[in-house]
Image (cartoon, rainbow, N blue to C red):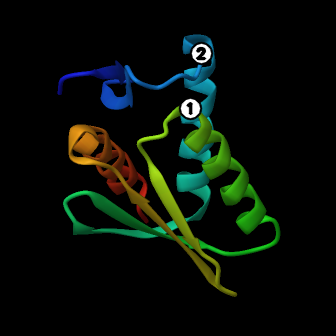
Amino acid sequence: MTGVMVMSGLAWVPQSCTLPTRERPLRVAEWDALFSERLTSSARPEPLQLHLELAGGPGVEERVRDLVARESDCCSFFTFTTVPGAERMGLDIAVDVAHEAVLDALAARTAEMQP
């Protein structure tokens, strides 16, 4: 996995990420909290795309949109698409070929958190 930094035994943060190193564990913790609290399913419809279903509820859409916006600022290789819904919220995450290993790591991380 070239160009990927390993955190907590899993590849997660690529070297091209501009988030300051000291803030990266906090961001990973935010994603982990979202996944552990809200993730209901994940799928890999294409090699460069990950689809997540998150349980809805008060403030969930705003929380996801805020996290996605901040992640897009430091890791511009991600393309996020949110699909709001009453009971569930879809989150599609896509990358380019150069960052497929990052998506692989994210998919592995979410698979560990699925109910």
Expressed as whole percent of the image width and height from the top left, the position of residue 5 reads 34, 20
Q: Amino acid at mark 2?
A: Pro
Residues 45 and 34: in front is: 45
Identify the residue shown where x is 49% and y is 40%: 76
Question: What secondary structure is marked by label 2?
Answer: loop
Q: Amino acid at mark 1?
A: Cys
Expressed as whole percent of the image width and height from the top left, the position of residue 91 reads 51, 67
Nearer to us of marks 2 and 1 is 1
Q: Tell me the quarter of the image containing the N terminus.
A: top left
Identify the residue shown where x is 74% and y is 56%: 63
Expressed as whole percent of the image width and height from the top left, the position of residue 18 reads 53, 22
> What residue would you read off at disc 1?
74
Residue 68 in the image: above or below residue 25: below
Residues 60 and 45: in front is: 45
- Label number found at residue 20: 2
| Total marks placed | 2
Residue 48 as seen in the image, left or right of residue 23: left
The reply to whether discs 2 and 1 touch (Cβ–Cβ < 8 Å) is: no
Residue 50 as seen in the image, left or right of residue 90: left
Residues 101 and 115: in front is: 101
Question: What secondary structure is marked by label 1?
Answer: helix
Decide which of tag 2 and tag 1 comes sooner along the chain. Answer: 2
